Image (cartoon, helix red, strand yellow):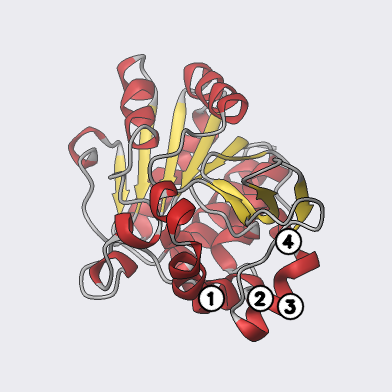
Amino acid sequence: MNSLVTRAAELLHASKYAVALTGAGISVPSGIPDFRSPGAGLWEKVNPIEVASIFAFRYQPETFFKWMQPLARKILSAQPNAAHYALADLEAQGYLKTIITQNIDGLHQMAGSQHVLEVHGQWREAICIRCYTIFPSEQFAEMYLGTGQVPHCSLCNGVLKPNVILFGEQLPAQVVMKAQQEIKKCDLVLIAGSSLEVAPVADWPHWAHSHGARLIIVNMQPTYLDELASTILRADVAEALPQIASACQNLEQSHE
């Protein structure tokens, strides 16, 4: 893998405006399961439309919260892993301008990343589906994790929905606009832990490539963009990304 790490570092070193795109795979080493890995993905056990769509949530929020409870425990107790810290290091070194993530766990920010765009929402807040008041999730998290009860708005008694994007919901417009602006400006996309199967985010690296950006893919499973990538590391993100960050630092020192 050493030659692939070196190649990735050289591409990052040569780039002028690199962004990272991360998916669920980057948080697996932190104990948060992903959704689509063969044999282990969450969607192999349940139908996502039945438990994680906005339509199901509005009619049967109890089903969503029952399914979400063990996953919420893992999200709220998770800590960043070496992959998150490596991306924060690459940002601090000036190699990465932005992290565009499909994850809702906030681990990039916990690791120290400053410029993070959460295109699928985040778990830190909840919104009332009746009056649209937003609450910090910590206000109801302990009770919910302990009892599994559906949380309700203290103002109108409407059901509180975690501020994450469910199936059938639109992505947050302002975040998507900012992410697409970053994709248009970039000359390299570092894709880490994403299967690139969820639109529209999965299309963005292809758009970037179409205007000349290079692609680095770090993922255990193949993706539809493998044939367009400048280099592919079929490796654990928690091993590969720190090696890439270290190689970038070595390149920087050798050019001083």
61 over 125 or under it: above or below: below
Q: Find disc 1 in the rendering and name its residue.
A: 69
Asked if disc 4 and disc 2 are in contact, CB closer than 8 Å, the reply is no
How far from the left and from the top, in percent, is residue 119?
A: 53, 39
Residue 144's label in the rendered image is 2
Residue at the spot 61% in from the left edge and 55% down from the top edge: 162
Element class at badge 1: helix
Label 3 near label 4: C-beta < 8 Å? no
Mark 2 element type: helix
Q: Are marks 1 and 2 in contact (CB under 8 Å)?
A: yes
Q: Name which of mark 4 and mark 2 comes first in the sequence.
A: 4
Image marks 1 and 3: residues in contact by CB distance under 8 Å: no
Q: Which residue is mark 4?
A: 137
> What type is the residue that disc 2 sits on?
Tyr
Give the label, 4 or 2, closer to the camera. 2
Q: Judge from the rendering whether residue 56 lies leftward or rightward of residue 37; answer left or right.
A: right
User: Dot 1, how many residues are within 10 Å of its Cα: few (below 14), some (14-19), or many (20+)?
Assistant: some
Q: Residue furthest top?
A: 211
Q: Residue at x 32, y 60 (%)?
A: 50
Amino acid type at circle 3 is Glu
Residue 142 disc label: 3
